[in-house]
Amino acid sequence: QVQLVESGGGLVQAGGSLRLSCAASGRTFSNYAMGWFRQAPGKEREFVAAISRNGVSRSYADSVKGRFTISRDNAQNTVYLRMNSLKTEDTAVYCCAATMGGGDYELAPRYDYWGQGTQVTVSS
């Protein structure tokens, strides 16, 4: 089992920045690729970003590319999501997820463990 706990969400004005953190415990963190997903009210969950086990490979949704940066610190068992130039449409609950599997990390079913999420609200 892997436990994931997100933090860092909050209320921010459009154009502002936030950094989300996801702390992992329970298993060897470096064995897992990590992803961030988000879900806005009335909408389906969507992929935001993913990072490989060693942090070398990263992928982003087109909607956040150039604004968001995913990173990880395997010594601290933590994955981060730096969000810049936030827009009102970024408002959502953001969840981190972990997988030992391979393949397309943009697909939510690839992930084995999920955190509870942290709310991000961007005001105009």
Image (cartoon, rainbow, N blue to C red):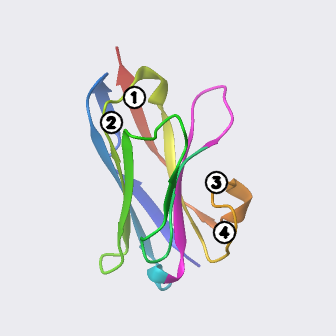
Residue at far top of view: 124
Q: Are marks 2 and 3 in contact (CB under 8 Å)?
A: no
Residue under label 4, please give it.
112
Q: CA–CA distance between discs 2 and 4?
A: 26 Å
Dividing the picture into quadrants, the one containing residue 75 is bottom left
Mark 4 lies on a secondary structure that is: loop
**Magenta stretch contains residue 65:** no
Label drawn at residue 121: 1
Q: Amino acid at mark 3?
A: Glu
Q: Amino acid at mark 2?
A: Gly
Question: Sequence-wise, which precedes: disc 2 or disc 3?
Answer: 2
Place of residue 38 in the rendered image (x, y in percent of width and height, measured from the top left): 55, 42
Q: Is residue 31 left or right of residue 18?
A: right
Place of residue 42 in the rendered image (x, y in percent of width and height, measured from the top left): 66, 25
Q: Are marks 1 and 2 in contact (CB under 8 Å)?
A: yes
Label drawn at residue 106: 3
Mark 1 lies on a secondary structure that is: strand
Q: Are marks 2 and 4 in contact (CB under 8 Å)?
A: no
Mark 3 lies on a secondary structure that is: loop
Relative height, residue 13 to residue 68 (above, below):
above
Label drawn at residue 10: 2
Q: Are marks 4 and 3 in contact (CB under 8 Å)?
A: no
Mark 2 lies on a secondary structure that is: strand
Looking at the rendered image, the disc whose residue lies closer to the viewer, 1 or 3, is 3
The structure residue drawn at horizontal position 54% and vertical position 38%, both measured from the top left corner, is 62
Q: CA–CA distance between discs 1 and 3?
A: 23 Å
Q: CA–CA distance between discs 4 and 1?
A: 27 Å
Place of residue 59 in the rendered image (x, y in percent of width and height, measured from the top left): 52, 55
Relative height, residue 58 to residue 49 (above, below):
below
Task: Classify 10 Å Cα crowding around label 4: few (below 14), some (14-19), many (20 and above).
Answer: some
Q: Which residues are magenta?
A: 31-46
